[in-house]
Image (cartoon, rainbow, N blue to C red):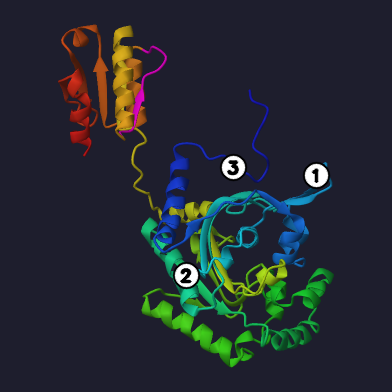
Amino acid sequence: MNTFQAPKGTYDLLPPRSATFLAVREAIAAPLRNSGYGYVETPGFENVELFARGVGESTDIVTKEMYAFETKGGDKLALRPEGTASVLRAALEANLHRQGNLPVKLWYSGSYYRYEQPQAGRYRHFSQVGAEAIGAEDPALDAELIILADQAYRSLGLREFRILLNSLGDKECRPVYREALQNFLRDLDLDDDTRRRIEINPLRVLDDKRDAVQKQLAGAPMLRDYLCDACKAYHEQVRELLTAAGVAFEDDEKLVRGLDYYTRTTFEFVHGGLGSQSAVGGGGRYDGLSEMIGGPALPSVGWALGVDRTVLALEAEGVELDIPAATSVYAVPLGDEARRVLFGIVTDLRKAGVAADFSYGGKGLKGAMKNANRSGARYAIVAGERDLADGVVQLKDMESGEQEPVPVAEVLTRLRALLG
């Protein structure tokens, strides 16, 4: 009995379910690769200050959920709790913004870590695919990213998700709203932690999910009433572009998101089949983040979509992805000479791009054919001494059960023709 188990709040991806996760990642990435986004990969840990400055010292992510540690050399690091700060740091470090082609468009896929109370759809280790467009302030860029995420989800067969949209204003109009909101919140009956949040980042109080808090927020000043003309015009352009593209969305005036760096456009993809953890992804514009982490002014926008939550959404809708079998051809040798010949055929099939597997371990015909069935292979190649003496192998169609002899020299050609 193995005494070791996956740490609390984590999960292992194993076949056959892991194939679904791979298919989801590919589906999310496909429209990005088709739209000028290049792949970026960053370390699994970063300087803790990167997240303290970028994500926000008042956020739950930094204060409660981040896995922070000190190395033997005294460096203070943290496992990455999100992707945007790391990707922006990497782009700045490599001076991608100085190469004259803005925006810098990047996509990524990886694991992220937050110390949260595990529940369905919320893990301490989770997987995301994200996209960032760095260095341009353009409502068409905001709309593009939302459209690409919508396209990815629809390509998977998801239909019951909703897109929530809001504007958080900018450095001109948000301070005025911040003061009005603080004045309103200070008169409410709130706990000490929430009162501290009022002074640091009052917009986060609007995102509080507790009923006792939400009931008191009725009548709170709304940001839409404080947006400057420039922010109103910008947001209206995003809305118009989405509408013209046929992408349905809902205006949500209380949508804040859990990170401090968002400005203007913010959005969230939600799905009713996930229970309390309804968000499957989201993002927004973060025009001041580059300056927060020591870079130049680089207005940017991006999103991250949860792979595990997307899989849960697919399961909630009963969507089964059309995932091809991992193996197309399975070879069953009967005897030492057949092992040598069929192993060579399998090697040639793989070189030709045909997914092929082999019956290892010297199993008998019955056991080997059971493995061939389990593999999902469309065809099996079976050969014994008598077949080889005649210069043939037996090619079996695993669906119809029909079997035919094929000359050894023609197996590759025959299978490529059958498999298209």
Which numbered mark, 1 or 2, is in the foreground of this view? 1
**Among all residues in the image, which is located at the extreme front?**
99
Amino acid at pointer 1? Thr
Q: Callout 3: helix, strand or loop?
A: loop
Q: Determine if the magenta segment contains residue 285.
A: no
The residue beneath circle 1 is: 71
Residue 363 image point, x, y percent? 37, 13
Amino acid at pointer 2? Ile
Say above or below: 400 vs 134.
Answer: above
Say above or below: 303 vs 183.
Answer: above
The residue beneath circle 2 is: 146
Say above or below: 254 vs 154.
Answer: below
Q: Callout 2: helix, strand or loop?
A: helix
State whether the magenta stretch is mostly helix, strand or loop.
Answer: loop
First reached walking from the N terminus: tag 2 or tag 3? 3
First reached walking from the N terminus: tag 3 or tag 1? 3
Quadrant the C terminus occupies: top left
State which region is magenta: 354-363
Residue 274 image point, x, y percent? 53, 58
Q: CA distance from mark 2 to mark 3?
A: 29 Å
First reached walking from the N terminus: tag 1 or tag 2? 1
Residue 389 image point, x, y percent? 19, 7
Residue 179 is tagged as: none
Residue 11 is tagged as: 3
